[in-house]
Image (tube, rainbow, N blue to C red):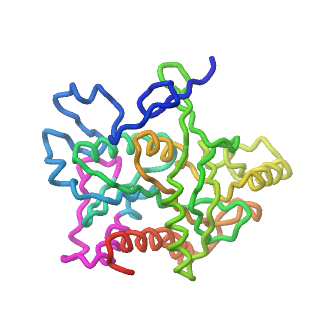
Amino acid sequence: MAPILLNCAGKEDEDYIKPQLHVKNPHLDSMEEDILYHFSLGTKTHNLPEMFGDVKFVCVGGSGNRMRAFAKFMHQELGLPGNTDEITDICEGTDRYSMYKVGPVLSISHGMGVPSISIMLHEMIKLLHHAGCHDVNLFRLGTSGGVGISPGTVVITDKAVDCFFRPQFEQVILGKVIIRSTELDADLAEELSQYASEMPELPTVIGKTMCTSDFYEGQGRLDGALCSFSTEEKVEYLRKAYNAGVRNIEMESTVFAAMCHMCNLKAAVVCVTLLNRFDGDQISTPHEVLTEYQQRPQNLVAHFIKKRLGLIV
């Protein structure tokens, strides 16, 4: 069966103009209540416009602890009153995700891999819709494996690609393979790159990010419980990826880009590399160095947010 290419409203005509809405699901209008189950939130149990209506920046990352630390960091960077220890997990009623709000910034964990972040994105986008948010910028902050670049380099994604280096995300819906574009906002990436140039301690490149469905064999690692290929085959594949413009590998970017694009949300993927995959598969860098690396995407996005809010010139 041939894949079907749909636009954001589920229509097959290429000239369809996307409306300025966050959700593309007509069934939501007929629901008496929308329960965001994995967030432990709902349209009847919570006043979502009051809680989230002022959100302008949504930052997501894999680890709950990391996103809590980012929320504390942003609290300090924005000069907000109160003690950072008082920042609470809005999703404390569930153990699936963590969510923290500091001023206009929402910090949410998404777990690991496409299925986990996909669930989070569905409910996060509906949350923004129900709260009446507008002009929101979304960022995925994460770690990744570098392809031909030095560890510690921050990669701003211009295109999220699959394991065949195609800028698309395949979703199976009702037995049909649906292909969605993974286009990210070029202006947002360029703005981030410009701000990165103002931070000499932040080595940064713009490049393609390859998203895989697995950390081990799917990324060409030789150190998993299973391995069906040789060292030479691994290096050849990584070389093909590099020649195709891929500069890092992770496991969430394609669905993140596709869903944000479908819902007309400006989004960027900003990930730091923890190693150069041409040099090996296992991460042996000291913990304190890795911690500093992981803060680099956060520092860049914090700089962006402060610029947008007029807190720095």
Residue 174 pos. (x, y %): 47, 20
For the C terminus, which image quadrant? bottom left
Q: Nearer the viewer, residue 100 or 9?
A: 9
Above or below, comparing residue 123 to residue 223 in the picture: above
Nearer-the-camera pick, 5 or 94: 5
What residue lies at 28% left-to-right and 47% top-to-bottom?
A: 128
Image height check: is 78 above or below 64? Answer: below
Q: Is residue 186 above or below residue 201?
A: above
Residue 284 falls left or right of residue 292: right
Left or right of 224? Residue 305 is: left
Depth check: give the residue in front, 258 or 227.
Answer: 258
Q: How many marks?
A: 0
Q: Residue 159: horizontal and vertical position, in percent?
A: 60, 51
Query: Residue 59's image quarter?
Result: bottom left
Q: Residue furthest top?
A: 1
Q: Residue at the front extreme? A: 15
Does the segment drawn in magenta span residue 92?
Answer: yes
Locate the N terminus by quadrant.
Answer: top right
Relative side of 276 to 45, left or right: right
Segment colored magenta = 68-97
Return the x and y of residue 249 as percentages of the image width and height.
Answer: 63, 54
**Residue with the most extreme right position:** 232
Height in image: 78 above or below 146?
below
Q: Residue at image x 66%, y 41%?
A: 166
**Residue 10, how many percent across, how many down?**
44, 27
Q: Where, by quadrant of the figure, is residue 163 drawn? A: top right
Residue at position x 32%, y 78% from top? 311
Instruction: Please tell me whether residue 142 belongs to the stretch shown in magenta.
Output: no
